[in-house]
Image (cartoon, rainbow, N blue to C red):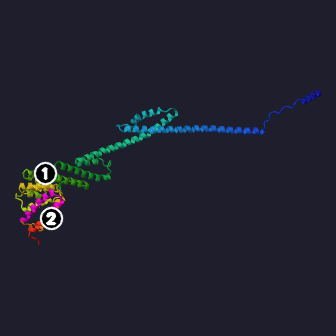
Amino acid sequence: MLRSMAIRMKEWGLLAYPRQRVHLPLNALNDWGRTGRMLGQEIESAARGAGDLALEWHRVASTGSDADVAGMLEEIGRETTEELMELPVRDWDYSWNQAYTPRVQQMLAQFSGDARERARKMSEQYGYRHSLEGRRRMEIERLRESRRQWENQVEQAVQRGDAESAQHWLEQGRSVFVPEEMMPQRLEQTRSRSLQARWQQRLQQNPHAALIAWQDAHEQKPEGEEELKLLNQVVEKTRTGLRSSLAIKMAAGVEQGVEPDAGALEQAVQAGVINPEILQTARQPRHNLSADEACCWLRRIDERSGKDDDLLLVEIAAAPIPAGERQQLLQRVQQTAAIPFNLRQAVSNRLWNMYHDGRFGCPGDEAALRCLGRLQEKALAQLENSSGAKWEQWLDGVQKNCDEWVCYQPE
């Protein structure tokens, strides 16, 4: 056995030294473990991050989808409300479901899965809100319509001049449309406006009779300051219109040689259209114009401002003078109508100043008055056919010539 062991040892010694095996340092193995752990953590973190990103993306996408749904539901709610507001709805909930549900179903058909379920739930919420808002709007509109109908009844009675009916309808709105504390004021206003409307109707239908009644202290009149002011304006306008009609009618009668209608004049006096003096004048005996009267009529015609033309025509037509002389005076009114007021007044004033200064003789003398009358006639021709400078020169010439032959000088 010893021999054998020696041989083996010898044989071993003859063999080459075996190669060294692959050597893995322990510190490298330790680094690999640490790297693997780090890589695992990063992979885990990345996986977790990917999951969070997917969740966030889903949330953003859902939010965007919900926003679209909200916009569509808002539009559907508005359309449904507007449609029902145009209809005579009795059962709001039933009518709302009938109009709202088909629109929502059509919208839901665009979605599927979770998006559809979310849209359905949103439609319930939006539908409930829009239904309440629509019902409230409908009730408010019905109240407004009731108030409009009530106010219309009151206003129609006022416009008819029916104060009793207007007050009756106003009472129907007591504590409903009109607060209790405001009722006395509203009743007073309504009565005043009704009386105003009644008077306006009377003035249109029978102006003479209405104007006569207006002067009666026992007649009911508006108590409101504004209504009474407006009605007084209407009364005065009516009087002016009647005076103008009377003037036209009487002037036409003068041209035709017809005497004034005493009945029409008396009615006009009662209505306050003309002064009582005109009626008294018309009843006087006819006589020819004196020189003084003729000059005064011409002066009044020439110096009128135009505001009292109607009254002037009535007075001329009612004057107790022959028809021919009345026709001449009316013709003078027509001829001077186109001449400016300031020119007519200036010439007339200067002629009358010369008359009062004694340029034509002693004021009041027949000769002086006839001279004044002739110059008044010539002045009309000057104004019709010449400019301002020429008629001033004409007046200067008149005054110069009068100085040569008139011996009278006022004290």
Placement of 5 over or under 29, stated as above or below: above
Label 1 neighbourhood size at 10 Å, few (<14), some (14-19), many (20+)? some
Q: Residue furthest bottom?
A: 411
Pointer 2 residue = 396
Determine which of the numbered discs, if any, sits on residue 248 in the image: 1
> Reading the chain from its start, which is encountered first: label 1 or label 2?
1
Specify the amino acid type for callout 2: Asp
Q: Marks 1 and 2, Cα distance to the nearest angstrom? A: 39 Å
Identify the residue at image location x=67%, y=39%: 41
| Camera-side residue of 246 and 398 | 398
Task: Name the mark nearer the viewer: 1 or 2.
Answer: 2
- Residue 119: x percent and y percent? 48, 36
Placement of 290 over or under 121, stated as above or below: below
Q: Overall secondary structure of the magenta stretch?
A: helix
| Residue 50 visible | yes
Task: Quadrant for the N terminus, please.
Answer: top right
Q: What element does badge 1 sit on?
A: helix
Identify the residue at image location x=32%, y=43%: 145
Whether tag 1 and tag 2 are in contact, CB under 8 A, the answer is no
Q: Is residue 83 left or right of residue 404?
A: right
| Camera-side residue of 329 and 389 | 389
Magenta region: which residues?
A: 366-395
Specify the amino acid type for callout 1: Ile
| Camera-side residue of 5 and 354 | 354
- Residue 309: x percent and y percent? 15, 55
- Residue 380: x percent and y percent? 13, 58
* Membership of 370 in magenta stretch: yes
